[in-house]
Image (cartoon, helix red, strand yellow):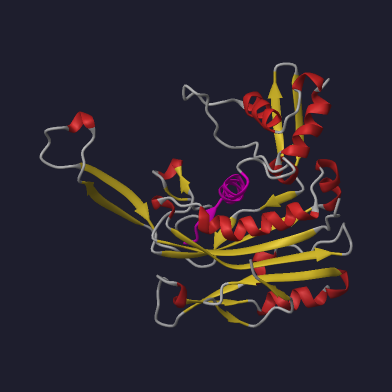
Amino acid sequence: MDAVRSGEVLFIKTVKDGIPNRDPLADSDARRLFGEEDGRISLSDVSVKRDVRDFVLAKYPDGGDAKDKFVFVHEERTADGKLLGRSGVVEKIFQRAEINVKELKNSEEKRRALCEHAYDVRLFGAVYSVTKESFHLTGPVQFGWAHSLHPVETHYVQGTVVLPSDNEEGNTQGTIWTTWYLPFAMFAMPAVINATIAQETGMRGEDVELMLEALWKGTLYRQARGRGFQQPQLLVHIEYTDPFFRIGYLDESVRAEIESGTKMPTELQDVTLDVTTLNDRISRYIDRIARIRVWKNPDLKMIGTLDAEECSF
């Protein structure tokens, strides 16, 4: 099994003409952890982890050749349309992985089997609690909240659907819809990878590689009109020689410079990402670093450079 190094990830992405993560407590407007006066909006880690899971589900619908890339946390239904619970999803995974559940004597054996065959459990952990069986796994990969790198104004818009619903037949107009949307925003999301916990869940180096690919391609893959058009811009992966070291708060080391004369950015060309401080902080701890890799959208304008291996998917 290829070993995992402790490390950090910084993921920068943009969204245009949509709300990437809605707040049900704010009439489905964007999430604002800092308040209206601050202006920034936020994305939860749940939203990004779903992008990863959806990409892995799409790429490996049958769990892959080794039957080790199934996804535990996802929506699955019975033939008559009912949602499966935790135990039902686990049984489906074991069935597809050709595991005889009756041979798993206790919850510990079931936990090990789930780690072996469920990709997202190895990364993000799991809470499993059913009758007489329960376990809790902390994941070696933890994402923080993503915050926009600049203030954002959202707008409330209204429109009409030409085709009415069945109970509105005979109306003179279609269904009225309303929604919140934002013109443009750039977000920075940090993540940490813990090599010690990776040993407990069985996460491998190849799992980390798939996660990085899923962050980039999953952002492009997961489509929904209300979420807007999303685009990955910059992905930084730092691996450390010391499993107990971390630079920390990489997202606080980048700045978005807004084009002069522009109050609020409306497109990518209105923003220049300043990575000067980030590169300075990384250079300060270069003796603790085993490898630095960067994936970048060539259309992204940047101030400064990162002394790192440039990669592509």
Q: Is residue 98 above or below residue 106?
A: below
Q: Is residue 37 visible?
A: no
Residue 277 spot, x, y in % from top left: 68, 77
Residue at x-position 74% and y-position 61%: 8
Residue 19 spot, x, y in % from top left: 43, 54
85 or 206: nearer the eye?
Answer: 206
190 or 123: nearer the eye?
Answer: 123
76 or 182: nearer the eye?
Answer: 76
Q: Is residue 287 above or below residue 46?
A: below
Helix, strand or loop for the magenta stretch, by majority: helix
User: Quarter-wise, where is residue 313 in the image?
Assistant: bottom right
26 or 282: nearer the eye?
Answer: 282
Residue at x-position 58% and y-position 80%: 302
Q: Is residue 55 magenta?
A: yes
| Residue extent of the magenta highlight | 39-60
Q: Is residue 110 visible?
A: yes
Residue at x-position 58% and y-position 37%: 74
Residue at x-position 64% and y-position 27%: 86
